[in-house]
Image (cartoon, rainbow, N blue to C red):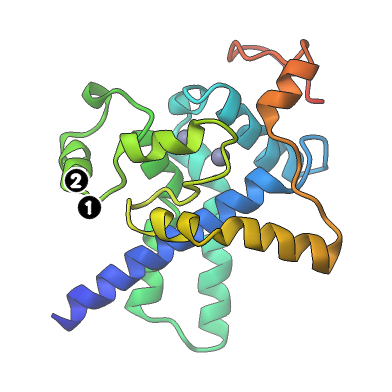
Amino acid sequence: MHIMIDILLVVLAVDFGSGLLHWLEDSYGHAKYPLTGKWVTQPNDLHHIDPMAFTTNTWSHSAAVLLIIGALIVAIAWMIGVVSWQLLLFVAIGVNANQIHKWNHLPSNKRPLIVVWMQAARILQSPKHHARHHQGTKDSHYCVITNVINPVLDSIGFWRGLEYLTLKMFGVKKRPEPSWLARQNPNWSTNGKGARTWP
Ligand SMILES: [Zn+2]
Ligand SMILES: [Zn+2]
């Protein structure tokens, strides 16, 4: 019983972590910044404009940034002597966050059967739930692992609060939503082929 509660807490922690990272990636940085522009902001902005584009990426392509973060977490935990099975499970699910997100964009016949079943059983986030992130201003439902944490965070205005604090503490404003930028920049190719021009 104890183990089940631990697993549940780890899954919810990964869900929260996925939302925090997603919010950070969607809200700050710029497509033209060195490193983070190419590896973080461009793929994120592209996902809002063309949600299906990333579904053809391989697992390792989708997991690259998460693998670096996961390795850092394990290395730091090891150095300070706090490695546990819970921490390793957190990292193991965490590096698959983009894969779990990708399943929400694939038609059901392209998803493994066990995934379709886990989504239906609400063990994993359902595609319908994630679709709400892609509506309107795309600034809610940031968590991508389960259906549990998003309604809580969105209803208390958690992300707007973080944006307010970031503005007050660091003077950094959330960047505009990319589909707005896309309309300003007709060169922004979304055909999934060739080079893209980033505003
Ligand atoms: Zn997003
Ligand atoms: Zn998505």
Of 121 and 164, nearer the camera is 164
Residue 95 visible to an observer of this rendering: yes
* Mark 1 in CB contact with mark 2 (< 8 angstroms): yes
Percent across and percent down for residue 98 are: 45, 43
Q: Which residue is mark 2?
A: 118
Location of the N terminus (image quadrant): bottom left
Query: Label 1 is placed on what type of residue?
Result: Ile
User: Total of numbered circles in the picture?
Assistant: 2
Query: Label 2 is placed on what type of residue?
Result: Met
Percent across and percent down for residue 61 are: 52, 37
For this view, does 62 lie left or right of residue 6?
Answer: right
Of 131 and 57, nearer the camera is 131
Q: Quadrant of ligand 1?
A: top right
Q: CA distance from mark 1 to mark 2?
A: 5 Å
For this view, does 122 lie left or right of residue 150?
Answer: left
In the rendered view, tell whether residue 95 sits above or below residue 98: below
Residue name at image x 67 percent, y 12 percent: 194
In the rendered view, tell whether residue 131 sits above or below residue 11: above
